[in-house]
Image (spheres, helix red, strand yellow):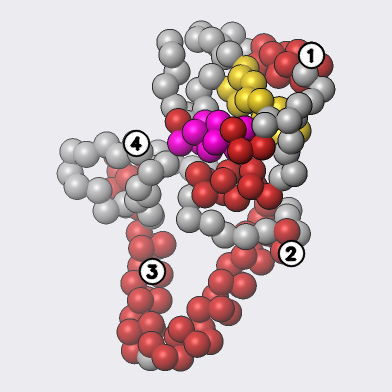
Amino acid sequence: MATFGRDTEKLLFRHEEGATFLNHGSWGSVPRPVYDERLRLLDEQESAPDRWFRWRVADLWTDNLEAACRFVGAQFQNTAFVRNATTAVNTVLKSLPLKSGDAILVYSWTHHAVRNICDATAQRTGADVLSVDIKIPIKSRHDIVAQYREMLDTHPNVKIAVLGKIMGSSHA
């Protein structure tokens, strides 16, 4: 069973004493085993940089992408690593053949950078951006699903819904 709290944080993370780090969405802090592996790989890179960049990086990249695909049940040929969620959303939206009359669906708490990408895509393509207005307090997940269902039923022109767990302002 997983354990949480200060003792686990001290065991797994390198955070300074007394700090509570909550912003993993922007600048990640990784568990000690991940940090240690990063240092091991950095040592490997520094010991033979030519070999590292010519051959090793591509193998590691492929191995890790295959592992990620297995973990999430994705097909390797349809998957890519990106630097962050904003880059991912930008990449996907630029790849879609959106046009005037189409719509992109977001929600009221969509992260600002992601919302800006949706707005820029709409401006570039002539599509509209629609938003599900999620209010606090949220009584149940069924209420949110019902809001999305109603939006999709009344706007069959929605071609993509952008959902995320990194939020902007809640407007509460």
Tags 3 and 2 touching, CB below 8 Å: no
- Depth check, front residue: 31 or 172: 172
In the picture, the disc for residue 38 is: 3
128 left or right of 155?
A: left
Q: Looking at the image, tell me whether mark 1 or mark 2 is earlier in sequence order.
A: 2
Q: Residue at x 74, y 64 (%)?
A: 77
Marks 3 and 4 sit apart, C-alpha to C-alpha, by 22 Å
Regarding residue 149, the answer to whether it shows in the image is no
- Above/below status of 154 relative to 90: above
In the picture, the disc for residue 166 is: none
* Amino acid bearing label 1: Thr
- Above/below status of 1 relative to 35: above
Q: Position of residue 148 (x, y in %)?
A: 71, 19
Circle 4: is it few (<14), some (14-19), or many (20+) Cα within 10 Å? few
Residue depth check, mark 1 versus mark 4: number of the one nearer the observer: 1
* Amino acid bearing label 4: Leu
Marks 1 and 4 sit apart, C-alpha to C-alpha, by 38 Å
Q: Position of residue 142 (x, y in %)?
A: 69, 15
**Residue receiving disc 1:** 154
- Above/below status of 49 relative to 71: below
Regarding residue 120, the answer to whether it shows in the image is yes
**Residue receiving disc 2:** 77
Q: Quadrant of residue 47?
A: bottom left
